[in-house]
Amino acid sequence: MLQSPANMSFDQFMHKGIRFAQKFYSEDHLNFIENEFEVFDDDVYNVTFPKSGTNWMIEMLNLIKNDGDPTIIHTVPIFERSPWFETVPFKDQMDKLTRPRIISSHLPCHLFPKSFSKSKAKIVYTMRNPKDVIVSLYHFSKILFLFQENDNVQKSIEDFLEGNTMFGSWFDHIKGWMQMKGDSRVFFITYEELQKDHRGSVVRLCKFLGKELTDAQIDSVVQHSSFSSMKDNKMSNWSQLPSDVLDQTKGSFMRKGVSGDWKNHFTVAQSEYFDKVYQERMKDLDTSFFWEQK
Ligand code: A3P
C-alpha cells in the first residue's frame, strides 16, 4: 500500500499503473468493473479526467434524457443521478438508475468494462485545457478531505506533469481515450467548446444521443445547466455533503466555471515549461485540441 504521496491524505494503492484512494476504490471492484460489469446497449457513459467538466456534463445529459424537464436535477443529488461506477460507495446506486443509465467515470480507457466493446452503448468523453484542470484541481484539493493542504501551484504542476495525481497521467488518459476516435459510439468534446457555444454543444449532444428535442426543450437544457443555475441548485452544487468531506468554508465545488483561469495562477516561466512538456508528450497524437487554438 502506498502512503500519501501526490498530495493525498489517505492510503492509496496502484492498480494497473493507476493510483487510487483506498477510501473510495478497491482492487476487487475495479476488477469487477473491468471484467464482469454488464454494459447495456442504451447506457451513456460520461467519461472525463477529473476537473474537466464531469458535473456539467451530468447535468446536460440528465436534462437531455428528460427532454429538458428539470425535475430530476432539482430532486436527486448529482452523484446519485449519474454515479461514478468505479467507486465502492456508489456501488449500490447503480441498481437504482432508470434506463437509459447515465453513468460517470474517471477511468482510463484500459480499465473500462470489456463488455463495452460488443455493445451499442455510448460514451461522451469531455476534455479540458490541462492548465485549467491543474488550477481547478489545485482549488478542489483545498476543500476535499482526500487531499492534503497545498498552497503551491508549482507542486501541483509538477505532480500533474509527472502523472502523480488521481487517475494517473492526464496525457495517458487523453491518449488512451483518443484511440477510440473514429468509433461512432464515442463523442469527444471539450470544456472550451461548451463554454464557447453551450447551445450548439447541446444540439450536437442530442444528435449523438439520437434525441430529438424541441427548441424550447433545448433552451431548458441550456438554462438549467448554466453555471449560475447549477451553482444555485443544491442538488448539483455538492453543498449537501458533510463538512468533513467537503469543507465549504474554504471554497466551493462550483468555483469559477471559466476557461483560462490558469493565466491568473501560472507564472510566465511555469506556462512556458508546461507548454514544452505538453508539446513533447502530445507530439505523437494526430489531433489539434480546441484549447490549442490561438
Ligand atoms: P473550476 O474549478 O475551474 O471552476 P468536474 O465536474 O470534472 O469536477 O469539474 C469541475 C469544474 O467544472 C469546476 O471548474 C466547476 O466550476 C466547473 N463547472 C461545473 N459546472 C459548470 C457549468 N455549468 N459551467 C461551467 N463550468 C462548470
Image (cartoon, helix red, strand yellow):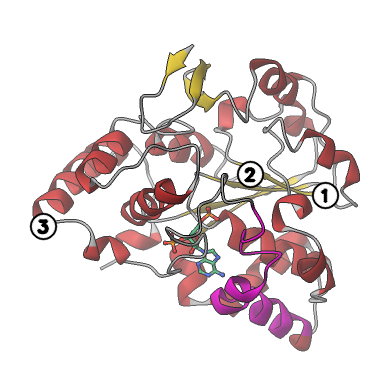
Q: Which residue is drawn at 68% across and 41% down?
A: 84
Image coords of residue 41 (percent x, y): 85, 43
Disc 3 designates what residue?
A: 268
Q: In which quarter of the image is residue 207?
A: bottom right
Is 224 contained in the magenta span?
A: yes
Look at discs 2 and 3 and give the one toward the viewer.
3
Q: Which mark is residue 101?
A: 1
Q: Residue at x 38, y 54 (%)?
A: 139
* For marks 2 and 1 on the same chain, the one whose residue lies earlier in the sequence: 1
Furthest toward the top, the residue is 1
- Boundaries of the magenta span: 217-241
Identify which residue, 84 or 220, lies in the foreground: 84
Could you tell me residue 282's position as x and y percent? 31, 40
Q: Give the camera-side residue of 256 and 162.
A: 256
**Which residue does the numbered mark 2 point to in the structure image?**
183
Q: What residue type is labelled 1?
A: Arg
10 Å neighbourhood of mark 1: few (<14), some, or many (≥20)?
A: many
Q: What residue type is labelled 2?
A: Asp
47 vs 23, nearest the viewer: 23
- Marks 2/1: CA–CA distance: 20 Å
Is tag 3's residue or tag 1's residue first in the polypeptide sequence? 1
Question: Against 167, is 263 above or below?
Answer: below
Discs 3, 1 touching: Cβ within 8 Å: no
Residue 174, above or below 134: above
- The local secondary structure at tag 1 comes to loop
Q: Is residue 220 magenta?
A: yes
Task: Measuring from the top left, give residue 101's x and y in whole percent.
Answer: 82, 49
Badge 2 local density, few (<14 within 10 Å), some, or many (20+)?
Answer: few
Helix, strand, or loop for circle 3? helix
